[in-house]
């Protein structure tokens, strides 16, 4: 565990020692802040119109503001998370330090988990920016905290899955741009697989839609935690990290 923690800390320091961390956090905060303002303004306008029409009805902050915000955050993450994972191994290969890393007295799994957890730490820092906006809702209204907690759990699991896929792809190239673009393309494909079930109800179509990371995030955004969704995300993370270990083993043999 100490080796994993050392590598994790090294990765986090590497992010914040360069403009990458601040750029990603700034971009995420800017886009999420715009979504937050738009959702809040739409909620207020809908409430005013309801009062003026004399048909005032209870309006849920969770349903009108928080759920759309969390869904939008997952979309923004699809674009920004590959920028976190693209450097994990590609930079090591480009700079030539991969040989030192592979010959160090550390197991492949310690290296993989340390780098993946470091990337997760960077991602959690991005999510913390969004939590500041959500905190304003609790200061000025009384939303239910449980859907918020489950929504963030879904964002963490979805982000962990994308980062695990990006970690594997980063071992296959020394070019960070290629690693980032490939991760985005694959994760975008996994995102849109859910569309298949909208125009085909056959068994094979349902099976393809089940592999979509969007399909398994939607229950979390509604405050629902289902075992099948947890199993899917944990299985996807393990599979991607296992493929990463096989890729590192292949690098070791070629070296």
Image (tube, grey):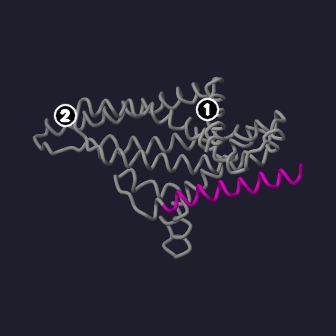
Q: State which quarter of the image contains the N terminus.
A: top right
Q: Quadrant of residue 205?
A: bottom right
**Residue 46 in the image: above or below residue 194:** above
Residue 174 lies in the magenta stretch: no
Residue 64 versus residue 23: which sits nearer the camera? Answer: 23
| Magenta segment, prevailing SS (helix, strand or loop) | helix
Q: Are marks 1 and 2 in contact (CB under 8 Å)?
A: no
Disc 1 to disc 2, C-alpha distance: 46 Å
**Residue 164 vs residue 100, the one in the foreground:** 100
What is the span of residues highlighted in magenta in the rendered image? Answer: 231-255
**Left or right of 150: which side holds 52?**
left
Task: Name the residue rendered at 77%, 44% in the picture.
Answer: 105
Name the residue that disc number 2 marks: 48
Percent position of residue 208, x then y: 56, 67
Q: Residues within 10 Å of mark 2 (few under 14, many from 20)?
A: few
Say whether residue 183 is left or right of residue 31.
Answer: right
The relative height of residue 210 versus residue 240 in the rendered view (above or below) is below
Q: Nearer the viewer, mark 1 or mark 2?
A: 1
Residue 156: percent from left, percent from top: 49, 46
Outermost residue toward the right? 255
- Element type at marker 1? helix
Q: Which residue is disc 1 drawn over?
A: 12
Q: Residue 56: x percent and y percent?
A: 13, 42
Count every numbered label the image shows and give the total: 2
The residue at 39%/47% (across/down) is 151
Q: Residue at x 73, y 50 (%)?
A: 108
Indicate which disc, 1 or 2, sits on the residue closer to the N terminus.
1
At 60% from the left edge and 50% from the top edge, which residue is drawn? 188
């Amino acid at each position: 565990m100490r080796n994993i923690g050392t590598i994790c800390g090294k990765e986090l320091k590497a992010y914040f020692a360069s403009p990458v961390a601040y750029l990603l956090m700034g971009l995420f905060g800017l886009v999420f802040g715009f979504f937050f303002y738009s959702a809040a303004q739409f909620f207020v306008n809908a409430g005013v119109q309801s009062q003026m029409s004399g048909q005032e009805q209870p309006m849920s902050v969770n349903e009108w503001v928080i759920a759309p915000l969390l869904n939008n955050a997952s979309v923004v993450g699809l674009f920004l998370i590959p920028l976190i994972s693209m450097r994990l191994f590609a930079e090591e290969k480009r700079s030539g330090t991969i040989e030192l890393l592979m010959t160090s007295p550390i197991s492949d799994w310690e290296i993989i988990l340390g780098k993946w957890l470091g990337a997760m730490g960077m991602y959690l820092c991005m999510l913390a920016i969004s939590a500041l906006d959500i905190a304003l809702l609790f200061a000025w209204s009384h939303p239910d905290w449980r859907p918020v907690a489950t929504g963030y759990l879904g964002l963490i699991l979805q982000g962990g899955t994308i980062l695990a896929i990006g970690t594997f792809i980063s071992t296959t190239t020394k070019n960070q741009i290629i690693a980032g673009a490939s991760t985005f393309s694959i994760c975008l494909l996994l995102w849109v697989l859910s569309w298949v079930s909208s125009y085909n109800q056959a068994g094979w179509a349902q099976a393809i839609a089940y592999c979509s990371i969007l399909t398994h995030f939607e229950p979390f955004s509604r405050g629902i935690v289902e075992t099948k969704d947890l199993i899917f995300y944990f299985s996807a993370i393990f599979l991607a990290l296992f493929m990463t270990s096989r890729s590192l083993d292949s690098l070791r043999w070629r070296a």
